[in-house]
Amino acid sequence: MDELFSAYLKYSRSLGLDAELLHSDYGHIIARIFGQNAGHAFRNEPGKHCVQRIPRTESNGRKQTSMVCVAVLPIKEEVCEPLLEDDLRIEAVNLGGPGGQHQNRTLSGCRITHIPTGQKVTINSRDYHSNEREARKILAARVNELRKEAADADYAAYRKEQMQGGHRSGKVRTYNYLEGRVVDHRLGTKTGDVKGVVLKGNFQKLFK
């Protein structure tokens, strides 16, 4: 995995892209690669990458096959969208309760409903306009939290789909050190320069 990540860094530099390591532990690496057409440059990488070689620690010469799962995702942005007026139902209400006779006999309370999600906020103090402003703030925060949760769920599902569970079937690419070649199963291309691809990041050899 470290070798493949190093190859990606070299590939990024060759294209003038910037790369930043965000997280690395327990066989899990997260990096951000950004620059012009960064997503296009890595469009062929999502999925399972198979590595076949004889480890240096293997004294009996037995071949080892390992798997690295790769996901290429857009950088997440904060979900903070304004509420659309057409999506709101605003009502003046009187819920009674403590607050004196003035509050009980006037419609100073405000209830706002976000129609698409069903979220409701009611503020029932003495001043209607203050209540409406406060209700809008609270409702916007709640709706945007729902949007964030939905976006996070979609993001996680997209990542899982790309990585395909980590099984050996459905490989994207095989790096075969024993035969010195790399085969791209998705593109139907191959090269006899496995070291050039892995050590120098020359993935262009496969992108024909």
Image: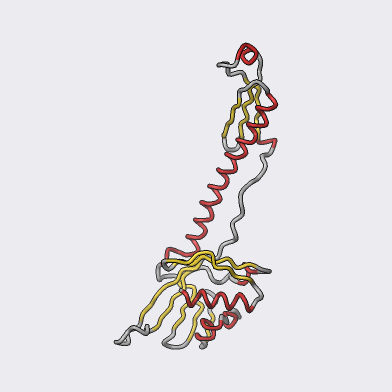
Where residue 110 appears, as percent x and y from the top left, is 64, 25
Residue at point 63%, 69% (across, down): 38
Q: Is residue 170 left or right of residue 83?
A: left
Residue at point 59%, 61% (across, down): 74
Where residue 120 appears, as percent x and y from the top left, is 58, 31
Q: Is residue 64 left or right of residue 22?
A: left
Location of residue 60 by image quarter: bottom left
Q: In the depicted view, which residue is nearer to us: 111 or 159? A: 111
Q: Is residue 6 above or below residue 146?
A: below
The colour mode here is secondary structure
Residue at point 55%, 65% (across, down): 72
Q: In the depicted view, which residue is nearer to us: 78 or 164? A: 78
Location of residue 17 by image quarter: bottom right
Q: Is residue 103 left or right of residue 171?
A: right
Q: Is residue 108 above or below residue 181?
A: above
Q: Report the number of discs.
A: 0
Where residue 25 appears, as percent x and y from the top left, is 44, 66
Q: In the depicted view, which residue is nearer to us: 143 or 188? A: 143
Q: Is residue 52 above or below residue 77?
A: below
Residue at point 32%, 87% (across, down): 61
Quadrant into which the C terminus falls: bottom right
Q: In the depicted view, which residue is nearer to us: 80 or 44? A: 80
Where residue 118 appears, as percent x and y from the top left, is 57, 34
